[in-house]
């Protein structure tokens, strides 16, 4: 049996390999969703591609792949040159070793990109309102600065220590705490916006005098997707935070898992949102002229005269707040 640190590195390699396999599957399905038509029978025209999402998917994939390769190489290299468990633990604990620094950088970069995308989605669904994302945006900028301090300290310490060494610990704890706060705020804002739009739409579609349960809508389905993916990401970050502040070597395992979970959660939102069915409603009220409108961030005033109303509810990817399919 090796030292706790060497055991943690071995468990981290094993679990990261499993989650990386899951991540590869979600990447394939996500790229199919972004590149092919809804029926999957043709490639989308270039003008219909959501380049922002495609670029982020490839960046997350690249960072996750680099981390998995480095984890495998570090374990292989360390146990090849080690003269025993103590020697291996010493190599793993060299906090300024280039591989260890790059491993920390991949985790920070992956987490920062995920946080930025949460803020971006919040910005899109609120009609590109800078005011709404001012607080989470400032938190992301602050977390980016903390990342720079953590990496600088790791490079310059030149000692054998855990990631939770006292010189780094305040900044590392701040990094994970800010990540959790950003997740909670942005996910809450996104869900609140969807819930308000969905409630307003249902009040128009289903008259107050109609009794009985209302059927589930596409927006409710999207809300569940956002909440579930948010819980997946936030839950993993919370476990990492607890492991870090308690000086547990389990932080090496949780960070290896987290870098893959971030990509999985990101891909699942795109995949499951794309699979959400379109919904169409038609309400006829007496005679008159047809009135068509799309669900948007602004309320739609319906005249008091008798009119024929055609209401179409579409998922957020084709909503007025989103220019291209798959943007959410």
Image (cartoon, helix red, strand yellow):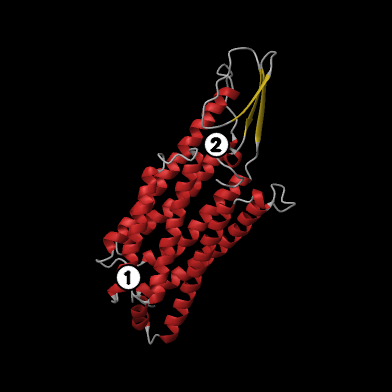
Q: CA distance from mark 1 to mark 2?
A: 44 Å
Residue 248: in sight, yes or no? no
In the picture, residue 279 is in which quadrant?
top right
Q: Is residue 160 left or right of residue 191?
A: left
Query: Quadrant location of the C terminus?
Result: top right
What residue appears at the point 45 percent right and 82 percent down from the top-left corner?
Answer: 77
Which mark, residue 154?
Answer: 1
What residue appears at the point 57 percent right and 64 percent down from the top-left corner?
Answer: 21
> Which residue is more in the foreground, 319 or 32?
319
Pick whichever of labels 1 and 2 is earlier in the sequence: 1
Name the residue carrying label 2. 220
- Identify the element where label 2 is drawn: helix
- Identify the element where label 1 is drawn: helix
In this view, the mark in front (1 or 2): 1
Q: Is residue 127 left or right of residue 167?
A: right
What residue appears at the point 54 percent right and 62 percent down from the top-left corner?
Answer: 61
> Which residue is more in the foreground, 256 or 292?
292
**Which x, y percent locates residue 246?**
29, 61
Callouts 1 and 2 close, C-beta under 8 Å:
no
């Amino acid at each position: 049996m090796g030292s706790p640190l060497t055991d943690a590195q071995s468990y981290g390699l094993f679990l990261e390999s499993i989650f990386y396999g899951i991540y590869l599957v979600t990447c394939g399905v996500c790229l199919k969703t972004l590149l092919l038509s809804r029926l999957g029978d043709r490639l989308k025209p270039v003008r219909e591609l959501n380049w922002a999402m495609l670029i982020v998917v490839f960046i997350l994939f690249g960072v996750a792949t680099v981390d998995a390769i480095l984890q495998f190489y570090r374990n292989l290299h360390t146990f090849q040159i080690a003269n025993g468990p103590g020697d291996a633990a010493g190599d793993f604990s060299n906090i300024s070793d280039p591989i260890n620094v790059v491993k920390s950088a991949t985790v920070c970069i992956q987490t920062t990109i995920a946080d930025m995308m949460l803020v971006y989605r919040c910005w899109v669904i609120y009609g590109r309102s800078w005011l709404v994302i001012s607080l989470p945006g400032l938190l992301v900028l602050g977390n980016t600065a903390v990342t720079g301090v953590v990496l600088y300290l790791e490079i310059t310490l030149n000692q054998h220590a855990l990631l939770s060494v006292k010189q780094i610990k305040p900044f590392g704890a701040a990094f994970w705490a800010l990540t959790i706060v950003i997740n909670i705020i942005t996910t809450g804002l996104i869900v609140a916006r969807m819930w308000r739009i969905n409630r307003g739409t249902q009040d128009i579609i289903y008259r107050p005098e109609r009794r009985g349960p209302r059927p589930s809508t596409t927006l409710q389905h999207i809300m569940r997707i956002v909440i579930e993916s948010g819980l997946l990401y936030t839950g993993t970050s919370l476990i990492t935070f607890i492991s870090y502040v308690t000086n547990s070597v389990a932080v090496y395992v949780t960070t290896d898992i987290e870098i893959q979970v971030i990509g999985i959660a990101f891909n699942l939102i795109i995949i499951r949102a794309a699979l959400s069915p379109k919904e169409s409603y038609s309400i006829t009220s007496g005679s008159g002229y047809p009135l068509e409108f799309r669900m948007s961030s602004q309320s739609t005033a319906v005249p008091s005269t008798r009119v024929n109303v055609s209401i179409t509810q579409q998922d957020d990817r084709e909503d007025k707040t989103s220019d291209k399919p798959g943007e959410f």
